[in-house]
Amino acid sequence: MPDPISISALQHWLYCPRQCALIHNEQVWAENQFTAEGQLLHKKANEDPDEHRSSGSILRHLHISSETFNITGICDIVEIHSMKSTTRNVVPVEYKRGKPKSHRADEVQVCAQSICLEEMFQTEIPLGLIFYGKTRRRTEVILDQELRDLTFSTITAVHEMKQSGFTPLAEYDSSKCDACSLIDHCQPKAMRLKRGAASWFASNLKTEP
């Protein structure tokens, strides 16, 4: 069996497949303001010890995995609420520095965490939570079949990317690229210009008599 993929790779893939390949295939990484702020928020979430009470437990920085889907990762916080003597309500809580986004990358990350926790705790998890640092609020993530199907297909796509070793070409998108810490390594604007020039020369060569 191939090595497991990191759950964070799913989030990277949905944000940008090229970013995902640079990080997880080519081992390229760089910090910027946004990644540093994110790491600080994760550190604050993880710095306190686990808590155990009669009403339940709070587990921090919990290593998780799924043999079924060959994925692995770390949950910032897992809340376990004791409902009855034989029933536990397990809720993953992911910390993010920004605010809710138009794409579903953060939700897929929480869904993948829940899939691991369901396998580990032999339970069903109907929802997860994301705490966004900018809004200072928790956002519910309903783990319905649509989100699970998106998560399953993303897991498959990332496994295929890892096995192929292929890095997609750069496609410049200002809303994503300008905030990406890998922009200097990726050089999406330069790649766009190169492709544009190559296309122009190819087109003109074809029309020459």
Image (cartoon, grey):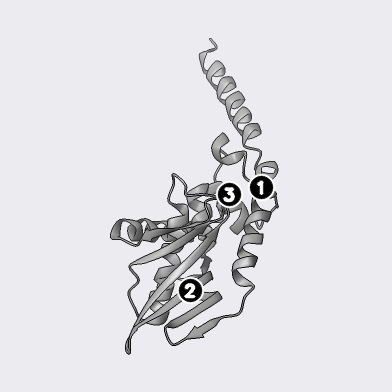
User: How dense is the environment of label 1, judged by Cα within 10 Å: few (below 14), some, or many (20 and up)?
Assistant: some
Q: Which residue is mark 1?
A: 181
In space, the residues marked 1 and 2 are separated at their CA atoms by 29 Å
- Which of the 4 image quadrants contains residue 157? bottom left
Where 136 falls versus 65 (above or below)? above
List x then y, in percent, for residue 190: 66, 32
Q: Which residue is mark 2?
A: 78
Going by the numbered disc 3, the residue's amino acid type is: Gln
Farthest residue in the left direction? 145
Residue depicted at x 63% and y 66%? 44
List x then y, in percent, for residue 52: 50, 85
Front one among 101 and 177: 101
Where 4 falls versus 204 (above or below)? below
Front one among 160 and 20: 20
Mark 1 lies on a secondary structure that is loop
Q: Earlier in the sequence, mark 2 or mark 3?
A: 3
Going by the numbered disc 1, the residue's amino acid type is: Ser
In space, the residues marked 2 and 3 are separated at their CA atoms by 28 Å
Q: Which mark is residue 46?
A: none
Front one among 196 and 67: 67
